[in-house]
Amino acid sequence: MKILLTTTSFQDTPGHHHKLLESTGFEIDTIRGPVKEDVLLPIIDKYDGVICGDDEYSRKVIEKGKNGKLKVISKYGIGLDKIDLDATKEFEISVFNTPGVNHITVAEHALALILTYLKNIHLEYNYTREGKWKRLIGHELYGKKVGVLGLGRIGKELVKRLSVFGVELFAYDIAYDDEFINENSIEKANSIEDLTLKVDILSIHMPLTELTKHSINKNVISKIKNPLIIVNTSRALIVEPKSLLNGLEIGKLAYLTDVMEEEPMPENHPLKNFDNVIITPHIGSRTYESVVRQGCMSVENLIGAFKV
């Protein structure tokens, strides 16, 4: 069996996931992802399976793989929006992901972004590095109204952590766990727009699909009266880019994100020009503990698929 491994956090982090992959006896080739379609097309037919990150598994790539040896795509991570799932069904390529392995670390990252912004840590760090002693006025998280958009595993973990900060909790989802809602004193919003109008901070925790793409858009942002902090550790395109830039320019928004529409981020990206923006390079799940969990599950999924 010949396997292509492209996820960089798997490759860069030592741990049991490496031993597990080595124990398979598979021949392993590595490329540092995320890998674009034009790179995958000439090589994908050589591989029986892949362990991928956010690589571009378009219809063309999947069809080319099927015409060769490709049988399994094992996603290291949860989001499958970069994989043409209709094509994988048509060409009978098995697809697996790793749910339930990174919810704690992503929730922690969302909370870290919120506290960093409210306390101006990102700005003060740079000032003191430059030898300055510029003391900005920050804000407390206590008493703020926080909305969680998507109450899946990650959204729930964030709620658990926020509850000790004395915040008012709001949420919107297409389906609710009413027991969890009641236990954590969460107020349900009637819509995404309703949620954004109720809160000071909005944290996004839902997958990118045709239904969720551009959920935060011009119509939603135009109705915001008080400045809103948006935290995005999910997928960039849940927020419509042009409307986001406009909201930042007129002071309606702050944006704290771990995800970009193009990764790695272009050097001239306009979000770099705002003090009310924090960008981290898709590291929300990049902790040692999470990498080992994701890595092991992605290898186990691959092994299991070939045993069927």
Image (cartoon, rainbow, N blue to C red):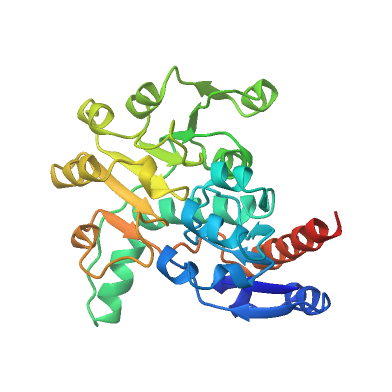
Residue closer to the observer: 242 or 34: 34
Residue most toward the right? 307
Of residues 239 and 54, which is closer to you in this image?
Answer: 54
* Left or right side of 101 for 282: left
Q: Is residue 96 visible?
A: no
Image coordinates of residue 45 in percent, x first then y, are 59, 68
Q: Residue at x 24, y 57 (%)?
A: 271
Locate residue 214: give its quadrant.
top left
The structure residue drawn at horizontal position 37% and vertical position 67%, both measured from the top left corner, is 264
In x, y percent, where is residue 28?
68, 79
Residue sitting farthest toward the left: 250
Residue appearing at x 23%, y 25% in the figure = 223
How far across and how far down the image is residue 240, in percent? 29, 41
Say if residue 83 shows up in the picture: yes
- Quadrant occupied by the C terminus: bottom right
Q: Quadrant of residue 145?
A: top left
- Residue 194, located in which quarter of the rendered image? top left
Residue 180: horizontal and vertical position, in percent? 67, 28
Tell me which residue sits at (47%, 56%) in the image. Answer: 60
Please state which of residues 232 and 116 is positioned toward the viewer in this rendering.
Answer: 232
| Quadrant the N terminus occupies | bottom right
